[in-house]
Image (cartoon, rainbow, N blue to C red):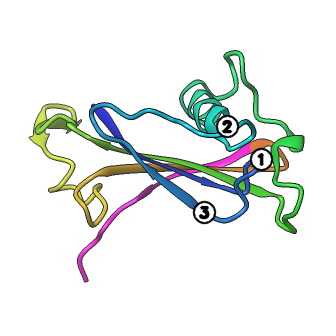
């Protein structure tokens, strides 16, 4: 799978929800304190649940925010066409309505006061 987008809200310098779209080759370029390292550290927290070098802490909440919740999300493309959900019955993420409106697998993790509160999928479920 390949990361297509990163979503960050209320994490360090990112107060509003910010979506960063990635391509096959993406370079983060900017001045000091522009948020380049924050994006990479958010990915570390997302994938390693704070068990690697970077740990989510209460001090990571944006200092200008009134909220105590932080969101880090990632969208993926290039996921397997076929998956096994129930013992041996093949299906797909699309058939199970697990993809967002852009047909990407989108997972968000919500942290409250620096601790993981919940993990959820953003899915486009038909009416």
Q: Secondary structure at mark 2?
A: helix
Residue at point 57% right, 59% down? 18
Q: Badge 1 local density, few (<14 within 10 Å), some, or many (20+)?
A: some
Report whether 124 appears left or right of 41. left
Q: Which residues are magenta?
A: 116-127
Residue 65 to residue 21: above or below:
below
User: Could you tell me residue 51's position as x and y percent?
Assistant: 68, 19
Please give the residue where the numbered disc 2 appears in the rendered image. 38
Residue 84 location (% of width, % of height): 18, 34
Q: Nearer the viewer, residue 23 or 93?
A: 23
Left or right of residue 87, residue 109 in this image: right
Spot the residue most to the bottom.
127
Rounded to the nearest angstrom, the CA distance separating label 2 from label 3 is: 14 Å
Q: Earlier in the sequence, mark 2 or mark 1?
A: 1
Label 1 to label 3: alpha-carbon separation: 12 Å
Q: Is residue 122 left or right of residue 46?
A: left
Q: Are marks 2 and 1 in contact (CB under 8 Å)?
A: yes
Question: Could you say which is closer to the camera, residue 22 or residue 90?
Answer: 22
Residue drawn at (17%, 36%), measured in percent from left and top? 83
Q: Which mark is residue 12?
A: 1
Spot occupied by residue 14 in the image (x, y as percentages of width and height): 70, 54
Is residue 67 shown above or below 103?
A: below
Quick one: 34 or 112, which is closer to the camera? 34
Determine which residue is flagged by label 3.
Answer: 17
């Amino acid at each position: 799978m390949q990361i297509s987008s990163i979503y960050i809200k209320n994490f360090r310098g990112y107060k509003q929800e910010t979506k960063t779209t990635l391509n096959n080759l993406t370079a983060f370029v900017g001045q000091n304190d522009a948020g380049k390292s924050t994006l990479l550290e958010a990915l570390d927290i997302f994938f390693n649940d704070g068990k690697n070098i970077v740990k989510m802490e209460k001090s990571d909440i944006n200092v200008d925010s009134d909220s105590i919740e932080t969101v880090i999300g990632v969208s993926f493309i290039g996921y397997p066409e076929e998956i096994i959900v129930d013992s041996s019955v093949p299906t797909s993420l699309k058939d199970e309505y697990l993809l967002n409106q852009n047909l990407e697998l989108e997972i968000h993790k919500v942290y409250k006061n620096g601790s993981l509160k919940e993990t959820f999928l953003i899915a486009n479920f038909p009416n």
